[in-house]
Image (spheres, rainbow, N blue to C red):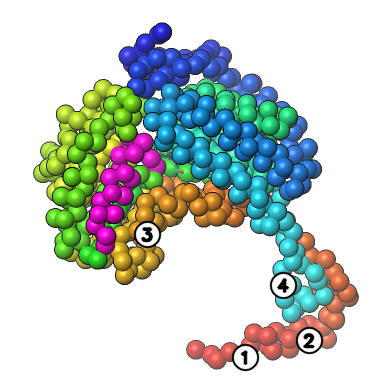
Amino acid sequence: MTVMTQAPARPQSGSTFESLNPATGEVVGTHPVQTEEEVRAAVARARGEAAWWDGLGFDGRKKHLNAWKTLMTQRLPELAELVSQEMGKPAADAMLEAALAVDHIAWAAGHAKKVLGRRKVSSGLLMVNQSASVAFKPLGVVGVIGPWNYPVFTPMGSIAYALAAGNAVVFKPSEYTPGVGGWLVQTFHEAVGRPVLQLVTGLGETGSFLCRAGVDKLAFTGSTATGKKVMAACAETLTPVVIEAGGKDSVIVDADADVEAAADAALWGACSNAGQTCIGVERVYVHEKVYDEFVSTILAKASGLEAAEGAKIGPITMPSQVGVIRSHVQDALDRGGRALLGGVDAVGDRFVQPTILVDVPEDSLAVQEETFGPTLTIAKVRTMDEAVEKTNATRYGLGNTVFSKANGMAIAERVRSGMTAVNGVITFAGIPSLPFGGVGDSGFGRIHGPEGLKEFTYAKAIARQKFKPMINLTSFERTEKADKQLVQVLGLLHGRGKKK
Ligand code: NAD
């Protein structure tokens, strides 16, 4: 057994790197750091497969994707164990993550034909002699760069939808979870028998090679800072990008809320996955009428909750994140905040204990920046307007949660975020028909749902002439009479409204 106490020195491309168990430091696996040539070769192999995969049509691809889904489901415990070893979350949480990912494969495979297949659209009165239709065609080869925090669920939001739309995919998993990435690609090969899904492993540099390797679109999930680098690299070749980046989600608790349920959701949303969730809860805004009740309820629920090996909260996966979490807690305390639970001492070398902060200024790091640990700020607000205003006052806009009996929908509509859960937490991520993605520094583009399928396609419009036009507009033989007729028709169609 090899035990490492620190992150390994950064290896060079062409060599190998190790993935480590973040709870123990044990080596889980060794993987190649792939070179630019190797990444280009993987893209070329994928391109060779893309025509076959596209040629299968929606029904053929659905059969193969369902075979993959079935194989994954049969081997779910093995996958959950690997996720748990490489990134540290409890195996039961890994199982939940993988189960949701499987459900997404099924949805994408089952709905691609209806969402993307050719359909007729109105040709309008001016072009009544035309039959108009639109279909959504695969782009070719899609590059997917993934993070480590949900190493199955997150990249699958791009991989499954890109594949169902008819693309081949080259997947670069995070350097913290390359074994999980390898497992996904290996099971795809076993189920489908063709390397339509390719794997490349390595560190950030290998990801940057993928951005420049001639893929037709790059779907990135990770931090906002890396997202900017990915976009800059892709801009060199006008490669379009999807950016799924960080967040700073809030829970808003109204005066009429089920406080018990809200406290439960806020605690789980903040501390599950050791707080390492892009749509995790990092802030709570509670109506003054239920503030005291909310605080006492969440503290009671948090007592006994512990981060440790084998506990409900696992380790912090990336050693460098521990320093970020500590700095956010320290900054909050230095600026007048109080820790009702945890605090700076709760931030250990590998594990961070649940930390609940109050009286934290709104412009402090713990309120504005992604902490990515099992920490939470709670603030009292006088109105829901104030809660919405404060929620919207960060550069992020990924998800959020609202607890209110009467006004949940109205409050949700005003939050500037890609998704909101009302009287539940993170529920939108498990609904495959809902699009997932952010605004602002949380990125752009959508995975999941019909929008997620369309994201990996281009729209192909066709206008087919059904009969000769009454007025031929697209010819040099167009007459003066035809021009007059056009003006008359236009007057009838659009000229009869009231002038302002
Ligand atoms: P990260 O940005 O450090 O790395 C993400 C991926 O990018 C890794 O595979 C990494 O190797 C690769 N990479 C690094 N440098 C690169 C470069 N220059 N060019 C190309 N690729 C490069 O992020 P992380 O620490 O793995 O993940 C955590 C972050 O991901 C958090 O900010 C979290 O909020 C975010 N996240 C967002 C979503 C979402 O759907 N919006 C989902 C999960 C995680």
Residue 224 image position (x, y, % from top left): 41, 40
User: Gap between marks 1 and 3, in whole Å?
Assistant: 45 Å
Question: Callout 3: few (<14), some (14-19), or many (20+) C-alpha neighbours within 10 Å?
Answer: many
Kindly identify the residue that appears in the image at 79 percent across and 43 percent down: 55
Residue marked by disc 3 = 422
Task: Say which of 284 and 305 sits in front.
Answer: 305
Task: Say which of 148 and 494 sits in front.
Answer: 148
SS under mark 1: loop
Q: Indicate the amino acid at tag 1.
A: Arg
SS under mark 4: loop
Q: Indicate the amino acid at tag 2.
A: Gln
User: Gap between marks 3 and 2, in whole Å?
Assistant: 55 Å
Residue marked by disc 4 = 122
Eye-nearest disc, 3 or 2? 3
Residue 125 image position (x, y, % from top left): 74, 79
Numbered range of the magenta stretch: 257-278
SS under mark 2: helix
Residue 274 included in the magenta stretch of the image: yes
Residue marked by disc 1 = 496
Task: Say which of 231 and 5 sits in front.
Answer: 5
Residue 20 included in the magenta stretch of the image: no
Question: Callout 2: few (<14), some (14-19), or many (20+) C-alpha neighbours within 10 Å?
Answer: some
Residue marked by disc 2 = 485
Question: Callout 4: few (<14), some (14-19), or many (20+) C-alpha neighbours within 10 Å?
Answer: few
